Amino acid sequence: MGERGIPNRCRCGEGVVLRTSKTIKNPGRLFYACRYGEENSRGHLFRWTDETMVEEMEDIIPKIDELERASLTLQKGLQAEMETLAMETRTCEAVVCGLEKELRGLEKEIQGCKIELRGLKNILVCIVLMVLVYVFVL
């Protein structure tokens, strides 16, 4: 016997067709056959459709089981990855919060430096004016 499941080609290389039995023993039963095969021809394909469907289902069940196992494994891996990413996100948020506090502190310090710089500028202007007054008055 050839391959299991729904056939695509006959042993002769031709595509298969779906036919309906007209015999008294199997009236209306579907079967796959070679388009060039004749009734009772051993050299060409003849397979009952219901039997090929059962074979298809029997062959696909282990594949479905394997896919389900792979899916569960992937799901567990993704869940672990999501937990890791959530933890890393919380860590990053804490770092950003700390940097924001540090930035606010630096901004206050810059404001203080600006005020101090204005004061030094005013003192410098006063000194320059005093020197000019001293030089031109004396």
Image (tube, rainbow, N blue to C red):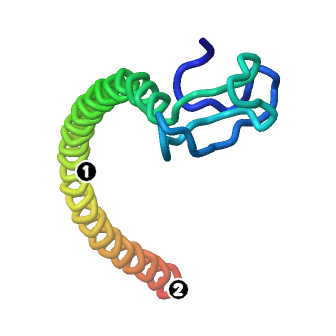
Q: Name the residue under label 2.
A: 136
Q: Is residue 99 left or right of residue 7?
A: left
Residue in front for this viewpoint, 88 or 100: 88
Residue in front for this viewpoint, 23 or 34: 23
Badge 1 amino acid: Val
Q: Mark 1 points at which residue?
A: 96
* Disc 2 versus disc 1: nearer the observer: 1
Q: Which residue lies furthest to the top in this view?
A: 1
Q: In this view, does 36 lie to the left or right of 125?
A: right
Secondary structure category for the residue under label 2 = helix
Q: Is residue 90 left or right of residue 51?
A: left
**Which quadrant of the view contains residue 18?**
top right
In the rendered image, residue 120, in percent from the top left (x then y), is placed at 34, 70
Residue in front for this viewpoint, 53 or 60: 53
Badge 2 amino acid: Phe
Q: Residue at x 30, y 64 (%)?
A: 110
Q: In this view, does 54 lie to the left or right of 116?
A: right
